[in-house]
């Protein structure tokens, strides 16, 4: 019994110490990585639950193992909450993460070599949307659309031209680094014109859609995937939503096509996150995320930074550091020293390499979760500006870090 009930700090003080260190890092730093967030204690508890002990290959009522009556109850609830949240005809909650969810969509809809249209990675797309080193680019014949060179926005005329020219089997709309609304209905009508399946990847903006701050593509598109750990503020994982007509093919592709047993402890935590996202307070959260992003972008622009598309409609922005004679890697390192996490990012038509591109990507989901508002977002812009202007002055960066810690102390995460 003792082996089962001893706390981590007693069983493995080394890892317990490392976890405590990470908790402190998260408490004391400003998290601006657009794909990250901070989950509730309730989500953490569900993830650390005894569901981690269970094997449940298959789906509710049709499992390949015994003892799944409680898992079924949990998974049915997770599915029904996700359906309600996104107004979906069908939901599969088993995908282990965003990339495997996307793999399942490709495999369910396309044969290897089929043509797929998606947004290019360095124009804001995702690796799993056809990058040559990714399974998507290796297995399928990807044709990629770009953003407009001047406006940095997706030009639907160009998407339509590409679709008419290439006649793809499937068209993807979705991004990891794009800050403007997507015209889902325009994508759908282009796809209908060429007989293509519509696939929306809302990994980044799912929480903003669930919070009714952005338009929901689920009723419009054939298939939509999302991660659950970004703006949706749940555990690491993903779900696939679709029209009923795609249910059988998608489910069969997730299991037994790609995965074995689902991660039931994570799926329980997904159910908790859907419950949280269904509360009215989550709509306030989603709106505040966007207001904070707009305040951060506005203040950076006022300080002379070029923001792609001159602002943002969602939670993220890409800063073109060429406007300040800086580059992405040095900026990321300087901000890290100042206690601010962000990710370097390519910009469309970047002439620099991916390891040291011309931009950084910033997002406000995590700072909004800890209660920061527009005033704090402007303060963060001031920290960023000061750190970038003193990027090689370690003493100055340490001083900024002190200010960052003070701000964070006013908005505690778990303490
Ligand atoms: C984050 C992301 C994914 C992949 O998610 P992982 O869980 O990291 O595999 C897929 N698509 C988009 C658009 C994303 O932003």
Image (cartoon, rainbow, N blue to C red):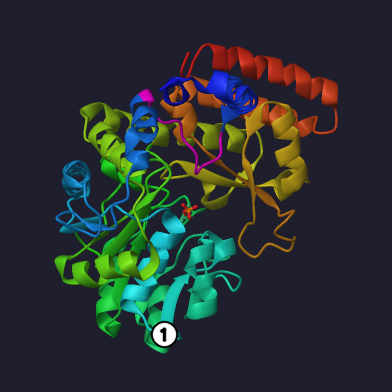
Q: Is residue 83 above or below residue 162?
A: above
Q: Is residue 390 above or below residue 229?
A: above
Query: Which residue is at 63% across, 19% downward?
Result: 404
**Magenta-colored span:** 32-41
- Residue 218 in sight here: no
Describe residue 150's horizontal placement relative to residue 280 as left or right: right
Residue 316 image offset from top left, x and y in percent: 49, 43
Q: Nearer the viewer, residue 227 or 375?
A: 227
Magenta stretch contains residue 38: yes
Q: Which type of secondary structure does the marked residue at label 1 adopt?
A: loop
Magenta stretch contains residue 335: no
Q: Which residue position is annotated with label 1?
A: 114
- Residue 307 in sight here: yes
Q: Residue furthest front?
A: 1
Query: Which residue is at 75% across, 34% downward?
Result: 334
Query: Which residue is at 41% across, 85% downward?
Result: 114
């Amino acid at each position: 019994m003792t082996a089962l009930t001893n706390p981590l700090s007693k069983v493995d003080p080394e890892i317990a110490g490392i976890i405590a260190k990470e908790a402190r890092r998260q408490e004391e730093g400003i998290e601006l990585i657009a794909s990250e967030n901070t989950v509730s204690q309730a989500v953490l508890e569900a993830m650390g639950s005894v569901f981690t002990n269970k094997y449940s290959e298959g789906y509710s009522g049709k499992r390949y193992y015994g003892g799944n009556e409680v898992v079924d109850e949990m998974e049915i609830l997770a599915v029904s909450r996700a359906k309600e949240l996104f107004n979906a005809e069908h939901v599969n909650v088993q995908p282990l993460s965003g990339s495997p969810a996307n793999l399942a969509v490709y495999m369910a809809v396309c044969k290897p070599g089929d043509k797929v249209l998606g947004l290019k990675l360095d124009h804001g797309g995702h690796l799993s949307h056809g990058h040559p080193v990714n399974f998507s680019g290796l297995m399928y014949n990807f044709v990629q659309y770009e953003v407009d060179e001047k406006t940095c926005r997706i030009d639907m005329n160009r998407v339509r031209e590409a679709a008419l020219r290439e006649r793809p089997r499937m068209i993807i709309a979705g991004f990891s680094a794009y800050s403007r609304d997507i015209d889902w209905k325009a994508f759908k009508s282009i796809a209908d014109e060429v007989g293509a399946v519509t696939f929306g990847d809302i990994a980044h903006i799912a929480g903003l859609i669930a919070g009714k701050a952005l338009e929901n593509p689920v009723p419009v598109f054939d298939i939509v995937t999302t991660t659950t750990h970004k703006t949706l503020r749940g555990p690491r994982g993903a779900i696939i939503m679709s029209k009923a007509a795609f249910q059988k093919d998608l489910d069969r592709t997730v299991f037994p096509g790609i995965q074995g047993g689902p991660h039931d402890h994570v799926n329980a935590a997904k159910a908790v996150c859907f419950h949280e996202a269904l509360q009215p307070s989550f709509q306030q959260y989603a709106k505040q995320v966007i207001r904070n992003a707009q305040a951060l972008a506005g203040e950076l622009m006022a300080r002379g930074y070029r923001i792609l598309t001159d602002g943002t409609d969602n939670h993220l922005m890409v800063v073109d550091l060429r406007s300040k004679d800086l580059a992405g890697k040095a900026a990321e390192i300087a901000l890290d020293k100042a206690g601010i996490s962000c990710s370097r990012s390519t910009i469309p038509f970047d002439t620099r390499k991916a390891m040291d591109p011309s931009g950084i990507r910033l997002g406000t989901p995590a700072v909004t979760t800890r209660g920061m508002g527009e005033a704090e977002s402007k303060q963060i812009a001031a920290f960023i500006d000061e750190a970038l202007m003193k990027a090689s002055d370690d003493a100055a960066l340490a001083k900024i870090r002190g200010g960052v810690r003070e701000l964070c102390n006013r908005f505690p995460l778990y303490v």
